[in-house]
Image (cartoon, grey):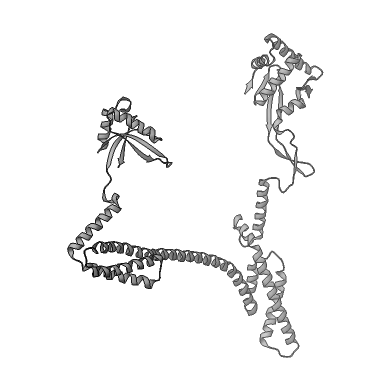
């Protein structure tokens, strides 16, 4: 973005608070002075710089203070010496490419191998080097042995045909081994060289061993990994199965006695009630029978041995058979008593909750305030009531409700038509479905 | 040159250059703020020097008709 002479003068006026004429005059004078540099001496303006004529052209050397003010972000930064190899990431890439190309050039067999693949083979180099050493060591040792054998044979003690063959075949091996002393040769070459000598069985075997060793090393690693994964999976499956089995088996053991106890208790009550009507002898017998299972059920609940538990079951069977002997009228009476007891124990189950719809006017946090509102509505003739509930934060709140209606429509109509003015608009009430 | 004018001229020039604006003075030339990123400078002795970034004022004189 450019700033013209006019804009500059405006800003100078604004900044210097000088009159326009003075500023324009000063500005023209400044231009005249700088253009006068061409004719003669350089013009130095304090804290701005020097206007100078260089090679017939006007140049400006900025004052160090102004230069620092302009370059304040990078002030104090100095040049840093960088080593050649670590100049930049691009250079590193170039180095890598060079290495890759050099490796490619070395790899005569696979000229089309990609750079990435060459790098992978680079990682495997140490393994190959070990292979080479093993091969060389074994072959050299064997060759030495063979040489010793040949020497023995050359002594003329016992010229054996096989040893002679070995001698014949071993000599070229030595020469080739000497050639193979170059570190850059691969294992494949050595293998090829050995394959060219089928007669030397020992050497071939050694090579096979080494090749199998290396292959088994890599394959065994993979197999180990696989076996580890299989083992972990199997272990996990076994653990899960054990947990499931444990979960399935244990509750049965726990639940059964409880159910038995619940079955026993009502029968005991029956007996207690029927005692009044039965003969004194029978009641004494019943008492004796009823006390036993009770004790035993307690023992079962305390976790006694299976033997005791089974005995308890037997007792229950005996007792149930004894109750079966009672008259049908007595059974009916007993059944009624049991039903009454059950109802008294679970009143909620016996009666269904009533659902209704109501118009909620207020939701208040204080019960007293809610009751106040209800009282005021009751005075006006509304059937108002308070309904307590708990909100999301588990805090107790109180609805101030008016009317109990069977359907949502009715409740809405009621609220819109019957409620006093500020509450009858749909914004000021909410129809809620509540239960007693 | 009046001292107040000089100081205000420097202040205005500095502010405009800070805002990456080019200040064009008719009859003189243009002042422009230039930013140079950091770069690697090879030295004649083989060393490579990383030069810091810099902001500086570039003055271009006005071309005058011959």
Query: To which quarter of the image does residue A280 belong?
Result: bottom left
Looking at the image, is A136 positioned above or below residue A21? below
Q: Residue at x 69, y 32 (%)?
A: A73
Quarter of the image with the C terminus of chain A in it:
top left
Identify which residue, B43 or A114, lies in the foreground: B43
Q: Residue at x 66, y 60 (%)?
A: A106
> Where does the image place residue A245, in percent across and percent down from the top left?
41, 66
Q: Is residue A65 left or right of residue A242?
A: right
The quadrant where residue A20 appears: top right
Quadrant holding the N terminus of chain A = top right
Task: Please state if A276 lies on the left or on the right of A399 as rendered.
Answer: left
At which x and y percent is residue A173?
69, 75
Residue A21 position (above or below residue A259)? above
Q: In terms of depth relative to the viewer, which is nearer, B39 or A374? A: A374
- In the figure, residue A382 lies in which quadrant? top left
Looking at this view, is A279 or A42 the one in front?
A279
């Amino acid at each position: 973005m450019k700033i013209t002479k006019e804009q500059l003068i405006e800003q100078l006026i604004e900044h210097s608070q000088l009159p326009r004429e003075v500023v324009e005059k000063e500005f023209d004078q400044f231009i005249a002075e700088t253009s006068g540099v061409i004719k003669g001496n350089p013009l130095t303006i304090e804290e701005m710089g020097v206007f100078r004529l260089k090679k017939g052209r006007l140049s400006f050397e900025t004052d160090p203070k102004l230069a620092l003010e302009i370059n304040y972000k990078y002030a104090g930064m100095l040049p840093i010496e960088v080593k050649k190899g670590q100049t930049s990431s691009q250079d590193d890439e170039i180095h890598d490419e060079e290495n890759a190309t050099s490796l490619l050039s070395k790899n005569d067999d696979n000229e089309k191998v990609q750079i990435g693949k060459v790098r992978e083979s680079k990682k495997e180099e140490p393994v190959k080097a070990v292979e080479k050493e093993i091969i060389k060591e074994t072959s050299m040792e064997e060759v030495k042995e063979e040489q010793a054998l040949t020497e023995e044979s050359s002594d003329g003690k016992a010229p054996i045909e096989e040893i002679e063959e070995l001698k014949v075949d071993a000599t070229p091996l030595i020469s080739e081994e000497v050639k193979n002393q170059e570190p850059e040769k691969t294992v494949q070459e050595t293998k090829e060289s050995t394959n060219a000598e089928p007669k030397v069985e020992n050497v071939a075997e050694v090579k096979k061993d080494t090749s199998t060793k290396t292959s088994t090393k890599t394959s065994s690693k993979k197999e180990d990994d696989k076996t580890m994964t299989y083992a972990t999976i199997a272990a996990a499956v076994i653990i899960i199965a054990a947990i499931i089995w444990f979960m399935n088996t244990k509750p049965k053991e726990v639940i059964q006695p409880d159910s038995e106890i619940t079955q026993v208790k009502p029968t005991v009550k029956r007996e207690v009630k029927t005692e009044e009507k039965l003969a004194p002898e029978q009641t004494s017998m019943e008492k004796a029978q009823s006390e036993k299972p009770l004790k035993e059920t307690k023992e079962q609940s305390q976790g006694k041995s299976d033997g005791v538990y089974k005995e308890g079951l037997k007792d229950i069977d005996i007792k149930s058979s004894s109750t079966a002997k009672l008259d049908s009228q007595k059974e009916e009476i007993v059944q009624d008593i049991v039903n009454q007891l059950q109802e008294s124990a679970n009143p909620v189950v016996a009666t269904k909750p009533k659902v209704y719809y109501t118009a909620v006017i207020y939701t208040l946090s204080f019960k007293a305030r809610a009751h106040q509102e209800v009282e005021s509505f009751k005075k006006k003739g509304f059937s108002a009531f308070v309904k307590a509930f708990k909100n999301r934060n588990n805090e107790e709140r109180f609805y101030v409700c008016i009317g109990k209606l069977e359907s949502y429509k009715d409740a809405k109509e009621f609220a819109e038509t019957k409620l006093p003015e500020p509450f009858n608009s749909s914004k000021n009430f909410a129809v809620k479905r509540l239960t007693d | 040159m009046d001292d107040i004018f000089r100081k205000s001229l420097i202040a205005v020039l500095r502010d405009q250059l800070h805002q990456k604006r080019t200040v064009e003075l008719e009859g003189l030339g243009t002042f422009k703020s230039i930013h140079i990123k950091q770069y690697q400078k090879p030295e004649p002795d083989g060393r490579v020097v990383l030069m810091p970034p810099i902001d500086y004022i570039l003055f271009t004189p006005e071309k005058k008709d011959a």
